[in-house]
Amino acid sequence: MGTRYEQIARELREDIRSERFAIGAPLPSEKELSERFHVAPGTMRQALNVLVDEGTLSSKRGARKVVLRMPARFPEISKFRSFAQWAYGRGRTPGGHVIHQEWVVQTEQDARLLRLAEGEKVLKVLRVRTIDGSPIMLERTRYPAWVGAKVEPMDPSCPSVTNELASRHNVHFFAADNVFSAAKAGEVDAKWLPLDAGDPVLVHRRLSRDAKGTPLEMSEDRYIADALSIAVPTSGKNNVLSWTTLNRFPWG
């Protein structure tokens, strides 16, 4: 699943890994690749740009792209990916269902992190998320009023709120602050996920923004212990990994 250009980028990565295209060798022309994948040149260019951005292909304009390195086995994290986009990108089927949603009075933390006006209410949503029909995560999200007004009437089983906001309302998620930690499942987690209270869960706390830096949502996602792993590529020039404690992060 995913967009067509993302699918093509994945196929090209596999071509490089299988040495169909060797390191140091040029790829076929954009026209030849467009014909191979039966897509317009613009779509092909998007796919190639994905590989340029991650450092797999050369970036010289007007010339054939050259393979610079083997693609990383783990995705780069420089671009925002929602839960559904992450799932689609791996050929899985995301799903979910809203358990409960309500408008609530803002807390001090809401006002500070979501930059709310005085008296502005927040849409609070509890949603269970699934992969291929199996529940793996419980999502607790809080939206500022202008976003919440668009989220509230959505189908409770909408597979991707992020995609829906982008396609129907021109609201685009661009960046996020992310913190991952371990915790014990609570009673609410145990009610909706295949685990018992006290079982370990992976907690993902996220504050998402658009390209202008405007906060769009604040979320705490709790994954069952064997649902996924987090991989962060690092190097001397690119190290986005840092260690912190929750009381030093804005949610603390």
Image (cartoon, rainbow, N blue to C red):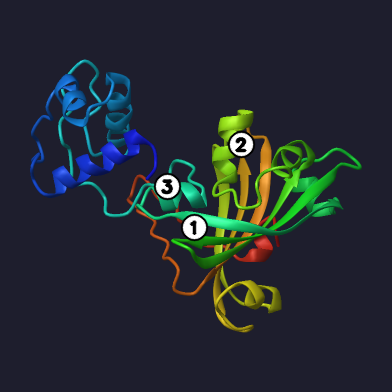
Residue 13 in the image: state x and y as whole percent.
21, 44
Say which quarter of the image contains residue 5.
top left
| Mark 3 residue element | loop
Q: Is residue 206 left or right of residue 43?
A: right
Q: Nearer the viewer, residue 185 or 43?
A: 43
The C terminus, quarter of image: bottom right
Residue 210 can be seen in this image:
no
Q: Which residue is mark 2?
A: 165
Residue that protrudes farthest toward the top in the picture: 62
Kind of residue sitting beneath label 3: Ile
Say which quarter of the image contains residue 51.
top left
Kind of residue sitting beneath label 2: Leu
Q: Residues within 10 Å of mark 2 (few under 14, many from 20)?
A: some
Q: Which residue is mark 1?
A: 242
The N terminus, quarter of image: top left
Question: How many discs mark residues in the rendered view?
Answer: 3
